[in-house]
């Protein structure tokens, strides 16, 4: 189920979906169904264009990023950092081996740990298909380099997605208070899993990529930009995940 969900989730993202529609349009064109082919091609082109505009991207992602406030010095017993991704290349610093998202999550977690020096850092995340070390272990390396004692770090390599990570955390923390650190746009779905498990949780979102409100309209907002397409992609991924979460109950 995990791999089926992963494949379908990625296929439904804007760029793969636009490419798929374009291929289908080409096949239809070769079969002389030009009207339908033209319609699919227009949908794919206009869809990519619209999702590459700042007003569209911010409208999709801002409700996710600003639903929960930033961590505000609450006392916690644990700090849970969700996994994201990494590569393994010993010629690179640990900050280059971790994804940008992972690095920011760990930095925010270490910042919170300095405010709660008795807390335990909990890193979760599996190794993926081909990596030798898990994302949790790579997170630990960065935390150690930022002066967190090893005795305050626990790593768990088995969870493959947010649901599995939160189920593991439930067994570890019980009813003690835990701050969960993840990307701001991912926090709504994460909190949904935490609330299902009745965990005493404090959200600690980081990596806010949008603004709560857009500046007044100007013509430059009609110019497509790749970073806006990335924001739209993240937002669609999360909204689909939230919908699936509600369907599962």
Image: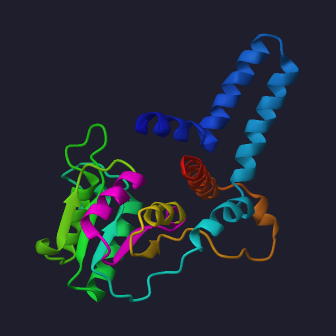
Q: Vertically, is 197 above or below 72? A: above
Dominant secondary structure (helix, strand or loop) of the stretch shown in magenta: helix
Determine the image quadrant of residue 221. bottom right
Q: Residue 58 versus residue 222: which sits nearer the camera?
A: 58
Looking at the image, which residue sits at the far right?
A: 35
Q: Residue 238 versus residue 55: which sits nearer the camera?
A: 238
In the image: residue 121, left or right of residue 225: left
Q: Quadrant of the N terminus?
A: top left
Residue 191 pos. (x, y %): 48, 66
Tell whether position 181 is magenta: yes
Determine the image quadrant of residue 144. bottom left
Q: Vertically, is 82 above or below 213? A: above
Q: Residue 56 versus residue 200: which sits nearer the camera?
A: 200
In the image: residue 192, left or right of residue 19: left
Tell whether position 165 is magenta: yes
Give the magenta part as a residue range. Answer: 162-187
Looking at the image, which residue sits at the far left?
A: 151
Q: Residue at position x 44%, y 82% from top?
A: 71
Q: Residue at position x 78%, y 43% from top?
A: 46
Q: Residue 93 versus residue 136: which sits nearer the camera?
A: 136
Determine the image quadrant of residue 32. top right
Residue 244 pos. (x, y %): 57, 47
Q: Residue at position x 32%, y 68% from top?
A: 80
Residue 198 pos. (x, y %): 42, 68
Q: Vertically, is 237 above or below 221? A: above
Q: How is the image coloured?
A: rainbow
Looking at the image, which residue sits at the far top?
A: 31
Residue 239 pos. (x, y %): 61, 54
Q: How many marks?
A: 0
In the image: residue 158, left or right of residue 8: left
Q: Vertically, is 73 above or below 201? A: below
């Amino acid at each position: 189920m995990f791999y089926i969900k992963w494949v379908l989730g990625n296929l439904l993202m804007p760029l793969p979906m636009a490419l798929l529609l374009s291929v289908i349009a080409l096949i239809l064109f070769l079969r002389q169904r030009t009207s339908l082919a033209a319609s699919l091609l227009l949908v794919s082109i206009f869809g990519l264009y619209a999702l590459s505009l700042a007003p569209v991207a911010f409208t999709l992602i801002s409700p996710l990023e600003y639903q929960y406030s930033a961590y505000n010095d609450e006392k916690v017993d644990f700090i849970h950092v969700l996994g994201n991704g990494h590569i393994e290349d010993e010629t690179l610093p640990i900050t280059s081996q971790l994804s940008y998202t992972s690095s920011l999550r760990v930095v925010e977690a270490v910042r919170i740990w300095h405010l709660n020096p008795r807390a335990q850092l909990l890193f979760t995340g599996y190794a993926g298909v081909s990596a030798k070390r898990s994302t949790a272990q790579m997170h630990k390396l960065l935390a150690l380099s930022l002066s967190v004692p090893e005795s305050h770090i626990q790593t768990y390599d088995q969870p493959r997605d947010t649901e599995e990570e939160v189920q593991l955390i439930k067994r570890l923390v019980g009813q003690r208070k835990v701050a969960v650190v993840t990307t701001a746009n991912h926090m709504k779905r994460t909190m949904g899993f935490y609330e299902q498990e009745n965990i005493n949780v404090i959200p600690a979102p980081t990596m806010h990529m949008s603004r709560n409100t857009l500046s007044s309209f100007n013509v430059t907002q009609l110019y497509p930009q790749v970073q806006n397409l990335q924001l739209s992609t993240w937002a669609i991924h999360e909204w689909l995940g939230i919908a699936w979460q509600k369907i599962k109950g």
